[in-house]
Image (cartoon, rainbow, N blue to C red):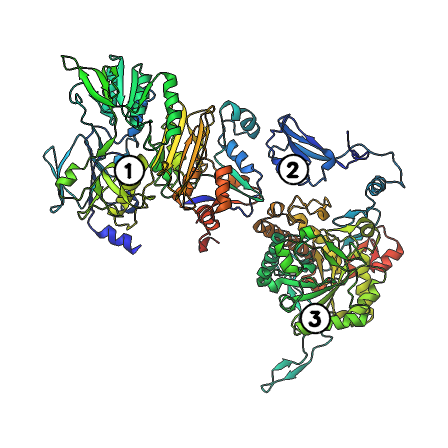
Amino acid sequence: MPVAKRKAQEAAMTYVIIGNGVASIGAIEGIRRQDQKAKIVVIGAEDSAAYGRPLISYLLAGKLSVDRLALRSEDYYVRNKAELRLGTTVTGIDTAKKAVTTDKGETIAYDRLLIATGGIPFIPPIPGVQGADIYSFTTLAHAQTLIELSSKIKRAVVIGGGLIGLKAAESLHDRGVGVTIVELAPRILSAGFDEKAGALAANRLKKVGIEVNCGVTAKEIQRNKNGRVKGVLLTDGRFLDCDVVVVAIGVVPHSAIAKEAGITVERGIMVDDKLMTSAKDVYAAGDVAQAMDQLSGERRVVPIWPNAYNQGFASGRNMAGAKQPYQGGLPMNSISFYGLPTISVGLVNPPENDPDFEVHAVLDQEKEIYRKLVFRDEKLVGYVLVGDIDKAGMYTAFIKFEMKLAGEAKDKLINAGPEVFLWPEKLFDETWNPAPAKAAR
Amino acid sequence: MKRVYPDKEYCIGCHICELACLTAHSKSKDLILAYTVERTSDGLSPCKHVHERGPTCVALSCRHCDEPACVAACISGALQKDPESGRTTYDREKCVGCWSCLMACPFGAIARHPLENKIVKCDLCFDRPGGPACVAACPNLALKQEER
Amino acid sequence: MLFQPINRNYHEFSIDRDKDKCINCKVCVRQCAYEAHYWDESRQKVMHDNAKCVGCHRCEALCPTSALLIQKKKSDFRDNALWKPEFIKYIYKQADTGGVLLTGMGSPVGNIPVYWDKMLLDASQVTNPSIDPLREPMELKTFLGAKPDKLEFTKTKDGSPKLKTRLTPNIELNYPMMFSAMSFGSINFNLHIAMARAATELGICYNTGEGGLHKSLYQYGKNTIVQVASGRFGVHRDFLNAGAGIEIKVGQGAKPGIGGHLPGEKINEMVSVTRMVPLGSDAISPAPHHDIYSIEDLHQLIYALKEASEYRVPVSVKIAAVHNVAAIASGIVRAGADIVAIDGMRGGTGAAPGMIRDNVGIPIELALAQVDQRLRDEGIRSRASIVAAGGIRCSADVVKAIALGADAVYFATAALLAVGCTLCGKCYTGKCPWGIATNDAKLAKRQNPDVAAKKLVNLVHAWGHEIEEMLGGMGLNSIESLRGNRDKLRAVGLSDTEMDILGVKHAGR
């Protein structure tokens, strides 16, 4: 109570958030948990309020209209007393003066600054990649461009067989565009999923008529004399006719302004356990940040949605003085391919022949059901589910809470699946039926 | 906030909470119709599930966490934390069925709708005058709604 | 039916399932401890086997659509006043098994009068005013134990009087009622803790029964009577000092003259530790106490227990109501007992041979009246309190018992009914579907002590209110004024002999 009172008497703080993605939403909600008064300024380079970025594939596929993309209701920013400045790009950060400058010529002072600028598509140095007819697929604008194009083009090549590439391929296919996927790795979904899960997903895609080429990549994007794309020459010598190329190799942290401001950046912006960067009162969260990863215990850039929200939330609370360390992120992806659901959490591709790991995988090719469990030190550290995903969360629990699974419990998890009675008694009680507060009894 | 707490010491595994939940979330509000008709025609299913092992059983559903993993994972904004009531709310219209919440929730409290690309999750019967139906139906006081 | 004993279809109950209402939700399947309901995989619906139904009504109570009705099977044997159906069925059963017929709960036989129903209470009109218990004080407080014949005082230096008579320890009860002995093991821990909590909240006592007292319940000691029976289960110094009173159980109304047998399956870890018997071994209470073959022996045991408890608590002796009960009670009082508990033939049990239960002993009403009279006649009534047990069903029974001379009553069957028992009488199977007479973990959890304790408290509160109303109606403001006040009772339809034994006049006199 006295803390709250003291806070109320202090002059209201100004929080400036650069970026208007999910990390930014997390930050607003984190700040408001702690501080109802403060002024929040959100600066977004895009023209729309925060939207569900992964929903752009639903938009491109025609499953959703653009008005359903918003992540929060219309009055969200007003209710949260957040001033939203859209279509505005931050051009510089002055950590000494505690202010940012924008492309609109403004200077906005901050007490706490959050850099949540996300990632930018990585464009590999393939000959012919610069110029017309090359698209990325990470923003609403990208999706809208592709929707407009889709009626005019016949064939597209998607470079990259990761989540973004596959969803772009699927959505374009739904729009009636012939799609070929090109993936350098020997299988699709090489990052988050394993070979078998990748194969099941690839089969689904092939079944509907999407071509999947693994182990090859684009050697050159060839153009006609007007400079328009006419096809992609592959490393194996084949040539794929196409009208457009979607480059979906991945995203890299959008950390340029942080670097310019003298903030420590490795792969992403380095942050401590409170999500604060090397500059005082400057925080970073989401795809731009290199934050703690639960399983490796190291700081890594893991550009996934839940991490972005969680880091945003944790940074918000900490900016507002909560002193609550960020728990560390857990890689996780849930994605469906033409009705085939797949989920992957944690460490799913352990180094081969490493005796520290134990892998249990069951595949039912016919039913398209696959489950892979990865253990390390008697703990579950990763899993993949394809087809039957109903118990996913219960598996996640064992990874997230780092529950030790001694002999019998482990066998049960492997043979009968996860269940809450495998939890340690204490965790179970604290989670589900904590002792009532004294006053309540 | 007042949450529903299950007591595994006294849960008798009768599954009546599931039936109450089903009825409370049915169109007809009639158990017989809910169970025999709406369950098959609409894929009506309970938000609460009784877990059993040997003599131990317990009825689990969404805990309405303070910092819900499902809200963090939700790509569509269908799952949100209501700052006023403290509930973790679900907007069926917004949901796209990406199953991220199902993956992220370590409490296994989110289920897939049997027929549609939607989820099924406890809403604490927020619009039911008598409070959560499961609590009211439990014959052994193994479900309590209280402030803890 | 095929491949079954020939008399299998002579079962007692039939399950009536309303097809319009049954939704095949399987609640009944999960609740039935006898597998009378089952899920038929091939038919994809819930089916039932009437022969397995014990008539416990658990399924009917929990069926969420009220689709079930448990009925007595309509099929009946040809009427025969001598060969009543139960005798026919007993013979079939014994011809199959060659064994003693086991039963649970109190005797259901109908041809032995329930004297409570043959006695009516008085009320005040005109000449002595009745009292409204809601407006005026009404005392139900009861003290159990020896009372001095007279009180002597000395004067202190400043001239004020000081009690010279040394008072013996008494048990203080807020209501003239106690929960009678049901051992831990015969009923489970959940009910023990519920009784302990309820007794504490009510300011009365519950009796541990002969199975000892679990350490965690010592905190309720002020409201506990600890029992010592022939098996001496769980008896040790701490146990004897844990309660507000000690009771020596000599006999039980439902099975006078025979011992007890708790099967090994009921001896789980907790019961084993509490009873001090090996895990899973049968706990057998001998028929007699092998150190009590005479009143003198009883005297020795009473005083041994008083010594062990340093004379801090009264000692009770509980006997079954049998033919010479008055003389036996007199001997018990003379042997030093502070309380005599008499258990009538309708008292409950977890397991008793049916022949014993239904044919041995006498009704509590007659026994109580005779014991009270005998102790008065011998001038030793104040040396002990009388507790009546065995078939107390309602507050009017309590009032009548007190008017017949009881200081307080014990009841157990009513307490079990309060927590759900339906008197199906299958306690001895250990599969009580109401979670009472069972230590099966899955069944025992059906008794949530929070719920059970509340129901027990409610029951005693309700009876207390009714007793106050009846007392007030008779113009009495204290239960003490009713004690042995047989003038407040009148008999209807009883013979002269019965009225003589009960010490009551016929209605109209």
| Number of residue marks | 3
Residue at image position (27%, 12%) is A154
Q: Amino acid at mark 1?
A: Val
Q: Residues within 10 Å of mark 1 (few under 14, many from 20)?
A: many
Residue at image position (16%, 40%) is A258
Which residue is tagged 2? C59
Q: Position of residue C174 (x, y in %)?
A: 63, 61
Residue at the bottom extreme of this rendering: C157
* Circles 3 and 1 on the same subunit: no
**Circle 2 — which element?**
helix
**Circle 3 — which element?**
helix
Q: Position of residue C257 (x, y in %)?
A: 81, 58
Of residues C279 and A151, which is closer to you in this image?
A: C279
Q: Quadrant of residue C285?
A: bottom right
Instruction: Tell me whether circle 1 and circle 2 mark residues in contact (CB < 8 Å).
Output: no
- Residue C445 vertical placement versus B94 (above, below): below
Which residue is tagged 1? A302
The chain letter for the residue carrying disc 3 is C
Cα–Cα gap, marks 3 and 1? 75 Å
Horizontal side of residue A298 vs C481, given as left or right: left
Residue C380, visible in the rendered structure: no
The chain letter for the residue carrying disc 1 is A
Cα–Cα gap, marks 2 and 3? 46 Å
Q: Position of residue C327 (x, y in %)?
A: 84, 66
Q: Amino acid at mark 3?
A: Leu
Q: Quadrant of residue C442?
A: top right
**Circle 1 — which element?**
loop
Which residue is tagged 3? C305
Number of the front mark, 3 or 1: 1
Instruction: Of the two numbered discs 2 and 3 on the same chain, state the one appearing first in sequence.
Output: 2
